[in-house]
Image: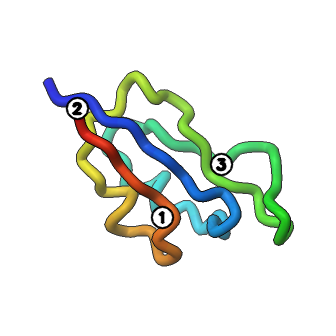
């Protein structure tokens, strides 16, 4: 099975949660910390479950997510 790794540009994240909703493996969640703009940003909640599908990166309106596939 393919494995993936998600990188989130936290300064661009506006916490819309589209990526959280679109992830088929529930790998992402809104964290407790906020960026310099005052938005809580998305973090990898279950990185070991990521399959590298890149649904999160495709739906992100801020292009704040990069997905690496192994």
- Relative vertical location of residue 23 with respect to residue 38 in this rendering, above or below: above
- Does residue 54 sit above or below 1 in this rendering? below
Question: Which mark is first along the chain, 2 or 3?
Answer: 3
Q: Residue at x 71, y 44 (%)?
A: 31
**Toward which corner of the image does residue 3 lie, by quadrant?**
top left
24 vs 66, nearest the viewer = 66
64 sits to left or right of 70 = right
- Dot 3 surroundings within 10 Å: few (below 14), some, or many (20 or more)? some
Q: Residue at x 76, y 57 (%)?
A: 40
Q: Is 16 situated above or below 43?
A: below
**How many marks on residues?**
3
Residue shown at 79%/59% (left/top)? Answer: 35
- The residue mark sitting in front, 3 or 2, is 2
Q: Residues within 10 Å of mark 1 (few under 14, many from 20)?
A: some
Residue linked to disc 2: 70
Residue for badge 3: 30
Q: Which residue is mark 1?
A: 18
Q: Secondary structure at mark 1?
A: helix
Residue ranking furthest to the bottom: 61
Task: From the viewer's perspective, tell me whether residue 52 is left or right of residue 45.
Answer: left
Q: Earlier in the sequence, mark 2 or mark 1?
A: 1
| Quarter placement of the C terminus | top left
Q: CA distance from mark 3 to mark 2?
A: 25 Å
Q: Residue at x 44, y 55 (%)?
A: 21
Q: How is the image coloured?
A: rainbow
Percent x, y for residue 29? 58, 44
Q: Position of residue 63 (x, y in %)?
A: 46, 71
Quadrant of the snapshot with the N terminus: top left
Question: Secondary structure under badge 3?
Answer: strand
Closer to the chain start, of discs 3 and 1, is 1
Determine the CA span between mark 2 and mark 1: 24 Å
Q: Are marks 2 and 1 in contact (CB under 8 Å)?
A: no
């Amino acid at each position: 099975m393919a494995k993936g790794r998600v990188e989130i540009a936290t300064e661009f994240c506006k916490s819309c949660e589209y990526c959280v909703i679109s992830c088929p493996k529930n790998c992402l969640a809104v964290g407790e910390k906020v960026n310099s703009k005052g938005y809580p940003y998305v973090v990898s909640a279950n990185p070991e479950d990521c399959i590298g599908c890149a649904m999160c990166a495709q739906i992100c309106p801020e292009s704040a997510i990069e997905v690496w596939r192994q």
